[in-house]
Image (cartoon, rainbow, N blue to C red):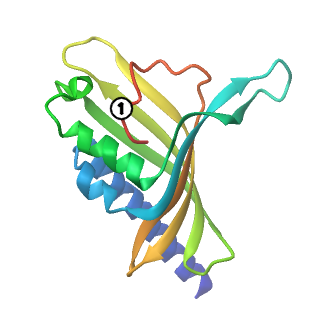
Amino acid sequence: MQELMQLSLQEEITQFYYREAYLLDHRKYREWLDLLTEDIQYVMPVRVTLENKRGSNLNHDMTYFSDTKKDITMKVERLYMKSAWVDDPAPRQRHFISNVMIEQTDSPKEYKVISYFLFKRSRSSEPHTEEIFGEREDILRKVDGGWKIAARTVKADQSVLTVMNLAMFL
């Protein structure tokens, strides 16, 4: 019975992430905002490459962004404005999510979820695509019978991002 409940939770959370990817890929940003809690912390620390066998690690003192729900909402609304030249013409984008691993937290309504991501974006007729890949660490919270993202830390594997801008959500 416990194993069946765990598989059901795994499927439910994985489907939540697939829905999130669909909303982002189809530019349904306002609908995506509904998947976030009001107290969300959405952070992307800078990865630093070290000169030793430990490889690279994250510098939590330096971030590409450290956003609240208010910050994210402002970025979303800006994408709907005609003056959002960074998004005109709209790029084609895809979010690929895999390796979803779930851990219980001290709160019965929250889970820590690790997932791998690959984000690809292509613009107009340019021959190359941009990509960011890595790991996300989320806190998912059950709110009114549905899942919401209460915290997200995006851990890009690249220490140098090769995208033109960070006008996307990961």
Residue drawn 54% across the image and 57% down it: 151
Residue 39 location (% of width, % of height): 49, 63
Residue drawn 31% across the image and 55% down it: 32
Residue 83 location (% of width, % of height): 18, 28
Q: Is residue 2 left or right of residue 22?
A: right
- Indicate the quadrant where residue 3 lies: bottom right
Above or below, 145 against 45 in this view is below
Please state which amino acid type lies under the numbered disc 1: Ala
Residue 49 location (% of width, % of height): 73, 22
- Indicate the quadrant where residue 86 lies: top left
Residue drawn 46% across the image and 76% down it: 142
Q: Quadrant of the C terminus?
A: top left
Circle count: 1
- Indicate the quadrant where residue 102 lies: bottom right
Q: Is residue 163 left or right of residue 92?
A: right
Q: Nearer the viewer, residue 34 or 98?
A: 34
Above or below, 168 against 50 in this view is below
Within 10 angstroms of label 1, few (less than 14), some, or many (20 or more) residues? few
Q: Nearer the viewer, residue 59 or 1?
A: 59
Above or below, 158 against 139 in this view is above
Above or below, 67 against 46 in this view is below
Residue position marked by numbered label 1 in the rendering: 167
Residue drawn 77% across the image and 26% down it: 55
The furthest residue to the left: 82
Residue 88 location (% of width, % of height): 18, 25
The furthest residue to the right: 52
Mark 1 residue element: loop
